[in-house]
Amino acid sequence: MKKLNGFSLFLAAILVSGCSSVQLSGQQKVAAETAPAPAEKTPEEPVASFEPDTLYDLLVAELGGQRKRYDLALGNYLKQAHKTQDKGIAQRAYQISQLIGARQASLDAAVLWAKLDDENAAALQASAIELVRAGQLDRAVEQMRKVLELEGEANFDFLAASAAELPESERVQLLSTFDNILKDYPDHRSLKLGKAILLLQSNQLNEAVKLCDQLLAKDSGYVKAIILKGRILNKMGKGDEAEKMLAEAVRKHPEIPRLRLIYARVLVHLDKLGEARGQFQELLKQSPHDVEIILSLALIALENDMTEESEKYFKQLLALGQRKSTANYYLGRIAERKNQFSQARKYFLNVMPGKEFMMSRVALIQMLLKQGKVAEARAQLDEDRNRFPVHAVQLYLLETEILVNAGELDDALKQFSDAILRYPDSVNLLYGRAMVYEKMGRIKDLETDLRAIIKAQPENAAALNALGYTLADRTDRFEEARELIEKAYELDNEDPAIMDSMGWIQYRLGNYQAALEYLQSAYEKYPDHEVAAHLGEVLWALGRKDDARALWDDALEKNPDSVVLRETRERLEKQPENPESKVSVVK
């Protein structure tokens, strides 16, 4: 937040005189008129008389802003906006709420500002945007109509962009409203562009492109339409066409960063990383401290194995104090690649909770395990659980995975049980312990944990499938297993693991042809060695032994250490020939 010009002096004068006027204008500037207007003249702005407690609240708010106590500043401004009904204070409250991303306060302040200053296009547009975000579409459009009537700059494109996170039904409603307004204002280009944005959000790409073409037919230099068309073409898979159009636009308008940025992103999408890098470097010349551009350059350099250049950009982010966790994570990976393990560890440990946190911990633990430092890895995970309890469950899961992979099932079970005592509502921990029970052959305990999950989450397809598959594979409770697996399949019929279970229960029930269809679908989606073992067994049961052997040979070539493949093949090869099996072969 910028310091307000003359605000402290203004408040000091007010506190002495007891009353005056406040006018807020510009982005973050307060302009005050302390001298009374001449009696014979009408003041240009309404004059408001403020009580001392109002002036005190405003002074506290500004001091709070200077000390980065934006919550205090916003609270005071919002309170006094409602109390005084002063449009300038309402505008200031809106600006602060935008600065700190306080959604409800933004709506409250914007609506109040528009009410108090209903001939101000900026106020009306701000309220419209906040009303869209709140899902109050009718009120939002009413405000934008007023902007049009005032002949103000109605940015319908910005309004449409604000609808990106709305439910589809509400976007459809907003699209219909745009169509109605277009009947009265058919040539309003921001309105047309806004409609194109809504069409893009609804994946109606052909219609969106047509609107962009209409806009560009009238003004080939309409940059917003060029940028939007580039995005749409890229989403349609027409990256080459987008590249050609945007390259020409950048040549004509080299000074417009947003245009060059979308061009660079299209080049990345087309895997033309060298050319994209050149565009990002040009952007960096225009905006040398733009964090997103620096990050893009760092990632492109890393993708192109330009390690030194990538490292330079990530360190630049650290120097700017921006995207620190992202920079530390990638610097850790770079240091690990250089075998600078101590430095890599420092970088990984500087990644704070957020998107890269777990990735950094996984990378750190894997690095320690490769060095044989198992105890050190577990100690680090324990330290992180105490330091970052929000990630404790994930860190427990990471540690138990280490133990399971090492065959330390008793230790893994103990760790899971300790974790569940601390986090009894964690479905992930219960599921993980159930899988350890399965490996230990403790089916009754597995069932207890999975049924606890299903009781809490009756539509948990993973738990339904895991229990159903285990009952089908390890018991003779086939009908019960079938019901569980079929329910999981109803919830998620695209998951290859559930398809595999459907195939396996059909096989166990003797429905070989149905089993074959499910397992073939599962293997096409996910050519896993366990699915290959099941599919081969069904082929074998159908008399298609050569097909089964060919499938297993291929799967073993890709997964030479697969125990399930070898055990399945050895078990079936040892079975005596059954002449009747050839009679029932379904080709």
Image: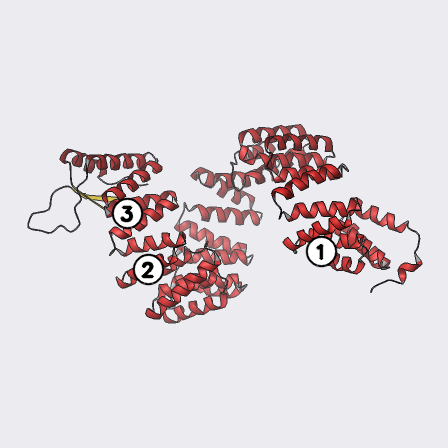
State the residue position of label 2: 142
Q: Which numbered circle lies on residue 522? A: 1
**Residue pictured at 89% horizontal, 63% vertical:** 583
Circle nearer the N terminus (3, 1): 3
**Closer to the camera: disc 2 or disc 1?**
2
Res 226 seen here: no
Q: Residues within 10 Å of mark 3 (few under 14, many from 20)?
A: many
**Residue pictured at 39% horizontal, 64% vertical:** 177
Residue 276 lies left or right of residue 21; in this view the side is: right
Asked which secondary structure carries label 2, the reply is helix
Q: Position of residue 405 (x, y in %)?
A: 71, 37
Is label 2 in contact with label 1 (beta carbons under 8 Å)? no
Q: Position of residue 27 (x, y in %)?
A: 29, 48
Compare residues 202 and 401 and report the one nearer the observer.
202
**Closer to the camera: disc 3 or disc 2?**
2
State the residue position of label 3: 91
Amino acid type at image mark 2: Glu
Compare residues 164 and 362 and report the one nearer the observer.
164
Amino acid type at image mark 1: Ala
Mark 3 and mark 1: span between their CA atoms?
A: 58 Å
